[in-house]
Amino acid sequence: MTALLATICLILIAIIVVQIGKVTELASKIRGEEEVQDQTNGRHANYSLLFMVLFLAATVVSALYYKNSMLWYGPNESASEHGSSLDSIFNITLFFTGIVFIITQILLFYFAWKYRGEQGKKALYMPHDNRLEVIWTVIPAVVMTFLVVGGLDAWNEVMADVDPNEEFIEIEGTGYQFAWHLRYPGPDGKLGARDYKMISATNPLGQVWEDEKNVDDFHPSEIYLPVGKKVRVRITARDVLHNFYLPHFRVKMDAVPGMPTYFVFTPKTTTEEYRQKLGALDLNGQPKYPEWHEPVDPTDPESPKKYESFDFELACAELCGSGHYAMRRVVKIVSEGEYQDWLNKQQSYYLSTIRGTEDDPNKDILFESEIKARRQEFNDNLEKALSAEEAAAKTLLLNHVNFETGSANLSKLSVYQLDNLADALNKYPNMAIEISGHTDNTGDPESNQQLSGQRAQKVKSYLVDKGIAEGRLTAVGYGSSRPVAGNDTEEGREQNRRTEFRITAQ
């Protein structure tokens, strides 16, 4: 019904315009065309002045009305230390361009009114005026000089790279259609090398796994950063042009395929502090920013208010495709303690996804972090066994001691676990142990018994070579007689093929 009424109104307006044109034409024939033209020019000139007043008033009123939501004044001040410099430059530029805009519009419509067509008037031909040329050349030049110098000063401050000797966090954001893939350094604080030729389904960033710095890098789903800590963001792209955009922090940098870029900034406000600012109340207890007190879901008044669910965000500021909107990522700024707690929960991408698979080029080596982790795990288990009262708790699995298939030859990586055992025996000189070998039930039981004994003896010999007295060590092979899992599955058989030691004296 509304559409029908609107259509009828448009048709009536068109008819009225046509009729007015016909009436004007008839009037011009009666009064004379020149007189009618003067009246028309005067009427249009007056209309233009009225339009100017309404236009400038609407411009100012709309700017004031939308200053918080679209121009980012009010609560949307910068959440980074460098952002105030950029905001200041924008404000100064807006001040001068605003003056020019208003003066230009007034003059434009004033001239249209003053120099409207009238009988007996002729246009003034002015080929040259040095004074005017000096005015409209010198004044803009002076203003532009201050703006450019101020802009360069802000640019040099904002775009300065980090000093290698200062403390900072370096993270990486790689854009692709349609998401950001984030990477953080692990405990070593360094991001590992990448090679685009190595990108695959299991290696989305093309990390070079031979580079030990990649071992502890992890890939979080959101950006977590501590407040007050300088951050260097390494920005890359995997397919087309993207743009790394953190609007609340005044960070915006293109992500260009084949050309890494960067941005350095320091968050100065936590997410929770920013939420409190958005939800602030005035002296009368009323919301300072009512738009942020509206429910997130307009259909559910009980849903959280907008300020309560606010989060900083990472977006792409390039129109990179139909799924461009999906590139939003949450950014959380927290205290140093919260940040450290979050870091401790993150898992290395290499160790959790690549290690031990067909894509792992380091099957025959252990990295320093793995050696430390295994040593700590062994020592913790040993301390529990030494303090335990139950006899069963005195038996420990050497879960990183392995042998070649069907052989008593130790695998290359077994030495790290055996070295941990040797160190423990040196630390506790009164401790004696029984080393036991076990197999699954595959093959001949007698052969399995013999193989398990040989493997236990191999471990004993290694410890003796490390200086442990032979009298403190006993080697026994149990074959398949003591399974810890069923032998009807490969997983069960793998658990049964094991080497253990039992503390017999301490």
Image (cartoon, grey):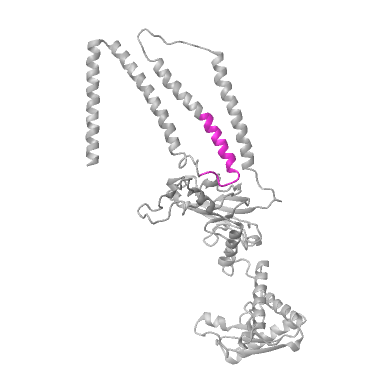
Residue at 57% in and 17% down = 134
Query: Could one spot residue 313 in this view of the protein?
Result: no
Front residue (pair 176, 171): 171
Nearer-the-camera pick, 295 or 149: 295
**What span is colored magenta in the figure?**
76-97
Q: In this picture, is 376 found above or below 22?
A: below
Indicate yes or no whether the magenta region holds residue 340: no
Q: Quadrant of residue 63?
A: top left
Is 310 situated above or below 105? below
Q: Position of residue 499 (x, y in %)?
A: 63, 83
**Residue drawn where x is 51% and y is 61% of the image:** 201
Q: Say which quadrant the C terminus sits in.
A: bottom right
Residue 267 is left or right of residue 10, and the answer is right
Position of residue 163 relative to residue 488, above or below, is above
Residue 78 magenta-drawn? Answer: yes
The residue positioned 65% from the left and 58% from the top of the image is: 189
Horizontal side, residue 310 vs residue 217: left or right: left
Q: Position of residue 147 (x, y in %)?
A: 59, 31
Looking at the picture, tell me which residue is in the foreground, 359 or 29. 29
Q: Residue furthest top?
A: 120
Q: Measuring from the top left, give residue 127's x and y in whole percent.
A: 50, 12
